[in-house]
């Protein structure tokens, strides 16, 4: 596929390939505490694309650059070289407000200084659509209610955010991201503090939401089996290098996973063509 | 789901405004010279109708020329400190952030003192003289906020503990410098300076300064209010706020400059008054929640109420002598703070 999506000329509609929503093109990054020093961390040039409704899992051991890649996609960081396009617009050059209307990010932990009710929290997702002082409209309330319903958290609306469990909190945070009505939903280890049932629930609803609302979802995770089961595409990173991109079945093979994660394991295919990974102890 | 509406905002604010009105009337009545409520009402109405010549009460002069300006000053200072505290707590993500605790008030005080010394040396024209202290205090506050902000950052984000320690150390350093400057004073000047540093509203201020103060408050508090929704999101951190569409650098600079103005103005007329900026926003948050569109006006009115009460106590408890109002707010504020703290962990 030709990847020559040009940076749009102002005033001219972007010539986006409608099949491709997210396009990461030869993106690299380097982090150095100050410019004169050698970079502490580099991300080598990588490319991949995702369509509307697709779930992309970003996998790799610690310090492989997963979160950095997610920050680059979110537009919070500027790539050293290359470009990341969302519907034809470079994510980093979007104005903050426009970016928040198109990209929602669910981060590992959302610490609140002063507690608020879950519904107040979800309504914050409407902030990019409001002026500085405008009060929430009926429409905002309907969208926020729908978002809560979509993640099955309607009953939590009136609870305080600091009085609900980790899994419930994660749902409310996801609802806030849905209230942003984004084109691209990014999640940084959303399953980190969840028990196994809640993890499956969350991934299940992510895939359903992606299909229903035509979001493109990119999720950073350590859970190989969940990624194998629910992702349409897997991006496998190791020490800042993109080793493979492709369907779970093509990327998640025994030799490469053993080499990347430094652990003996076995991979079998399920009836639905999804890889299932079993870890062995080292001894 | 009951999001804040303009109607509810106005209703709640009118309740607070009504309480403020009652407090002001009582404060006008109380004092070394007793005034009847009837005489007070008649006087106030004749003033409102611009018939100052027909003041009925023998004590009209005391009430209108001494007590009323002082009460208006307390309203402006209380509102300024409380709004400054409320926005600082959100911007710096720290429940203890307030201009007094973080040394910003001390910075403003030092700025005001330096401005006074320069004023004496430079022979500033009399019309400008009244503005020198507020400007010096503003500059002192702005520089101190910048220093504390830089001290409080770690890995590109504000770190609560570091910020607090940085602020406390800055405050103690600035107090030491002020002490050194005070050793050059003597007699009445020294007593005046001591009162001012403890927070004092008894010095009569020229009317022009009251206007200047009100204008500064409206401009600064208004500027902060335009960022009210953004401050709500900043409670979850700068990075998260940015991902929800908040222009964090803009909010930071607006709040930073406006808090410098508020603190500078308050300190230049009343010295160092603690606890109002710290406690009033917390109490308002307990009552009205942490939506800044509601919290900021509530804090302004609440701060005004609190300081008018504190100043009325300061001038009546040991009447006819005055206690510095800063001592009053600390004596009442410290136990209240401890109570709120224990309640939170209970």
Image (spheres, coloured by chain):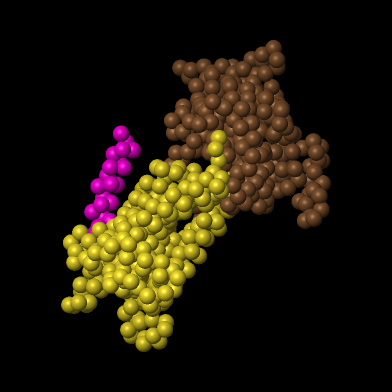
Chain colours: A brown, B yellow
Q: Is residue B60 left or right of residue B301?
A: left
Which residue sits at x=40%, y=87%? Answer: B125
In this orientation, does residue A125 appear?
yes
Which image quadrant for residue A203?
A: top right
In this orientation, does residue A234 appear?
no
Position above or below: B63 against A30: below
Which is the main secondary structure of the residues drawn in magenta? helix
Q: Is residue B340 magenta?
A: yes
Which residue sits at x=44%, y=49%? Answer: B15
Position above or below: B198 against B119: above
Position above or below: A33 against B1: below
Provide residue B297's location: percent of width, then percent of height.
47, 53
Q: Is residue A244 left or right of residue B178?
A: right
Which residue sits at x=38%, y=77%? Answer: B53
Provide residue B92's location: percent of width, then percent of height.
43, 52
**What span is in magenta?**
B325-346
Provide residue A235's location: percent of width, then percent of height.
65, 32
Provide residue B261's location: percent of width, then percent of height.
44, 66
Q: Quadrant of the N terminus of chain A?
A: top right
Which residue sits at x=42%, y=74%? Answer: B51
Which image quadrant for residue B83?
A: bottom left
Q: Is residue A124 magenta?
A: no
């Amino acid at each position: 596929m030709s990847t020559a999506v040009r940076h749009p000329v102002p005033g001219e509609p972007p010539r986006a390939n409608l099949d491709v929503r997210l396009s990461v093109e030869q993106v690299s990054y380097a982090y150095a505490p100050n410019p004169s020093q050698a970079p502490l961390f580099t991300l080598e040039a990588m490319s991949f694309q995702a369509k509307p409704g697709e779930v992309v899992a970003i996998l790799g051991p610690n310090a492989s650059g997963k979160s950095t890649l997610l920050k680059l996609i979110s537009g919070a960081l500027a790539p050293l070289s290359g470009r990341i396009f969302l519907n034809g617009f470079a994510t980093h050059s979007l104005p903050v407000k426009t970016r928040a209307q198109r990209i929602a990010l669910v981060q590992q932990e959302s610490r609140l200084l002063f507690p608020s009710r879950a519904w107040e929290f979800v309504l914050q997702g409407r902030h990019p659509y409001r002026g500085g002082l405008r009060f929430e409209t009926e429409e905002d309330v309907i969208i926020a209610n729908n978002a809560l319903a979509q993640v099955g958290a309607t009953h939590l609306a009136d609870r305080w955010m600091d009085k609900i469990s980790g899994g419930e909190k994660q749902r409310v945070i996801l609802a806030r991201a849905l209230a942003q009505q984004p084109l691209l939903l990014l999640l940084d280890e959303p399953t980190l503090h969840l028990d196994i049932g809640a993890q499956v629930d969350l991934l299940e609803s992510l895939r359903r939401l992606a299909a229903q609302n035509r979001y493109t979802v990119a999720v950073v995770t350590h859970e190989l089996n969940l990624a194998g089961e629910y992702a349409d595409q897997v991006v496998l990173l190791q020490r800042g290098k993109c080793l493979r991109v492709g369907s779970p079945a093509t990327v998640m093979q025994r030799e490469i996973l053993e080499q990347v994660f430094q652990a003996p394991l076995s991979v079998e295919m399920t009836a639905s063509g999804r890889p299932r990974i079993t870890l062995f102890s080292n001894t | 789901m009951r999001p804040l509406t303009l109607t509810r905002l106005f209703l709640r604010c009118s309740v607070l405004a009504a309480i403020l009105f009652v407090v002001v009337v009582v404060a006008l009545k109380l004092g070394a010279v007793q005034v009847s409520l009837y005489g007070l009402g008649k006087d106030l109405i004749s003033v409102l109708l611009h018939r100052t010549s027909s003041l009925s009460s023998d004590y009209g002069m005391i009430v209108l020329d001494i007590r009323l300006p002082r009460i208006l000053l307390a309203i402006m200072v209380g509102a300024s400190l409380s709004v400054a505290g409320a926005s600082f707590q959100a911007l710096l993500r720290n429940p203890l952030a307030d201009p007094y605790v973080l040394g910003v008030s001390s910075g403003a005080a030092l700025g005001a003192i330096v401005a006074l010394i320069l004023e004496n040396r430079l022979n500033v024209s009399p019309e400008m003289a009244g503005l020198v202290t507020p400007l010096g205090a503003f500059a002192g506050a702005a520089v101190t906020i910048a220093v504390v902000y830089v001290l409080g950052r770690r890995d590109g984000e504000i770190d609560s503990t570091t910020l607090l320690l940085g602020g406390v150390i800055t405050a103690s350093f600035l107090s030491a410098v002020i002490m050194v400057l005070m050793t050059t004073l003597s007699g009445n000047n020294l007593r005046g300076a001591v009162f001012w540093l403890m927070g004092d509203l008894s010095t009569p201020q020229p009317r022009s300064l009251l206007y200047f103060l009100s204008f500064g408050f409206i401009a600064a508090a208004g500027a902060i209010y335009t960022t009210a929704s953004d401050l709500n999101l900043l409670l979850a951190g700068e990075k998260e706020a940015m991902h929800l569409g908040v222009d964090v650098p803009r909010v930071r600079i607006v709040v930073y400059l406006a808090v410098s103005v508020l603190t500078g103005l308050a300190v230049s007329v009343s010295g160092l008054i603690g606890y109002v900026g710290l406690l009033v926003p917390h109490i308002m948050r307990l009552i009205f929640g942490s939506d800044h569109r509601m919290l900021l006006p509530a804090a302004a009115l609440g701060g005004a109420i609190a300081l008018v009460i504190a100043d009325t106590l300061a001038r009546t408890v040991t009447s006819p002598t005055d206690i510095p109002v800063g001592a009053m707010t600390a004596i009442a504020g410290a136990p209240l703070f401890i109570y709120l703290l224990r309640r939170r962990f209970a």
